[in-house]
Image (spheres, helix red, strand yellow):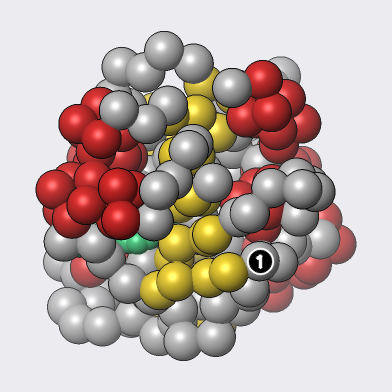
């Protein structure tokens, strides 16, 4: 089985299939990635054709796309490669978040729309869109606290503090961050999963700019949990 990874769900799935030979593939974006059990390969395949070649060369029986919901290119490549190599594809994608009573969310289609909207909502921004999502805010006149696993690269907002950290994050920690930095607006991708920052924002009554997921390729079956994906893989 080949798991396209880069998420905690991919790591959990790799460790939950005894008796299966698992290869996990990572893009190589982070310098010290958390490694799953089993074989790991790192780096791109060279598009959908390269991935299809890999599936054939390694005689892969099942391809699992367990990449992040915002990693749209690799998901589209996975669908095309599985199709052309005749390999069944299982997609593991955690559900997005839903607005709760007490939330003030502004849903936007992409980071550019988030940047346009931001000046109307606050002056001190907690940006949790990841390293590659910071450049979109370079021209926004506000103060930013940006959290990412790796240091971001220019262009960057002029008034920026970078917090290098990797989740999961605790509710107490998120409360402290919002208070210590007097944050008045949060920007997040609708990644799903642990939601401590959203709870902390709700408690503080601050608005959230929520970036919608990019469209996913139409696929026969999407598993929402690791257990569901494992069951699906074992049934193939
Ligand atoms: P992307 O835009 O969808 O992919 C860009 C290219 O990176 C792909 O065409 C592929 O190169 C390569 N790639 C991506 N994931 C790969 C994988 N698991 N194994 C081998 N090659 C991979 O992806 P991205 O948004 O840059 O994300 C990169 C990785 O980080 C993903 O694996 C994802 O799960 C993880 N991640 C992303 C986010 C996010 O917000 N985007 C957040 C957390 C984790 P080739 O075409 O050469 O094969």
- Identify which residue, 49 or 142, lies in the foreground: 49
Q: Which residue is mark 1?
A: 38
Residue name at image x 25 percent, y 35 percent: 85
The reply to whether residue 140 is visible in this rendering is no
Q: Position of residue 56 (x, y in %)?
A: 30, 47
- Identify which residue, 105 or 204, lies in the foreground: 105
Residue name at image x 55 percent, y 33 percent: 92
- Identify which residue, 4 or 177, lies in the foreground: 4
Q: Is residue 156 left or right of residue 130?
A: left
Is disc 1's CB within 8 Å of ligand 1? no
Q: Furthest residue to the top?
A: 220
Q: Position of residue 95 (x, y in %)?
A: 58, 27
Q: Position of residue 201 (x, y in %)?
A: 66, 46
> Residue 18, relative to residue 62: is it above or below?
below
Q: Furthest residue to the right?
A: 172
> Residue 150, relative to residue 68: is it above or below?
below
| Quarter of the C terminus within the rendering | top right
The reply to whether residue 198 is visible in this rendering is yes
Residue name at image x 34 percent, y 80 percent: 152
- Identify which residue, 21 or 77, lies in the foreground: 21
Q: Quadrant of ligand 1?
A: bottom left
Secondary structure under the numbered disc 1 in the rendered image:
loop
Q: Is residue 23 left or right of residue 216?
A: right
Q: Position of residue 105 (x, y in %)?
A: 50, 30
> Residue 154, relative to residue 114: is it above or below?
below
Q: Pointer 1: residues within 10 angstroms few (<14), some, or many (20+)?
A: few
């Amino acid at each position: 089985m080949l798991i396209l990874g880069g998420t905690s769900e991919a790591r959990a799935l790799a460790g939950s299939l005894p008796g299966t030979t698992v290869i996990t593939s990572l893009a190589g974006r982070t310098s010290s990635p958390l490694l799953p059990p089993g074989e790991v390969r790192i780096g791109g395949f060279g598009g959908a054709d390269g991935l299809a070649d890999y599936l054939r060369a390694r005689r892969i029986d099942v391809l699992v796309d367990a990449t992040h919901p915002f990693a749209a290119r690799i998901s589209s490549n996975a669908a095309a490669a599985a199709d052309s190599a005749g390999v069944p594809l299982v997609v593991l994608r955690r559900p997005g978040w839903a607005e709760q009573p007490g939330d003030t969310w502004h849903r936007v289609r992409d980071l550019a729309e988030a940047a346009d909207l931001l000046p109307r909502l606050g002056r001190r921004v907690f940006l949790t869109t990841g390293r590659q999502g910071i450049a979109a805010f370079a021209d926004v006149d506000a103060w930013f606290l940006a959290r990412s696993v790796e240091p971001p690269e220019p262009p960057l907002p002029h008034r920026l503090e970078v917090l290098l950290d990797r989740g999961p994050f605790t509710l107490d920690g998120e409360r402290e961050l919002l208070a210590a930095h007097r944050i008045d607006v949060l920007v997040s991708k609708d990644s799903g999963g642990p939601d401590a920052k959203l709870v902390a924002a709700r408690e503080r009554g601050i608005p959230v700019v929520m970036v919608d997921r990019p469209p996913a390729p139409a696929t026969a079956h999407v598993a929402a949990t690791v257990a569901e994906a494992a069951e699906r893989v074992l049934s193939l």
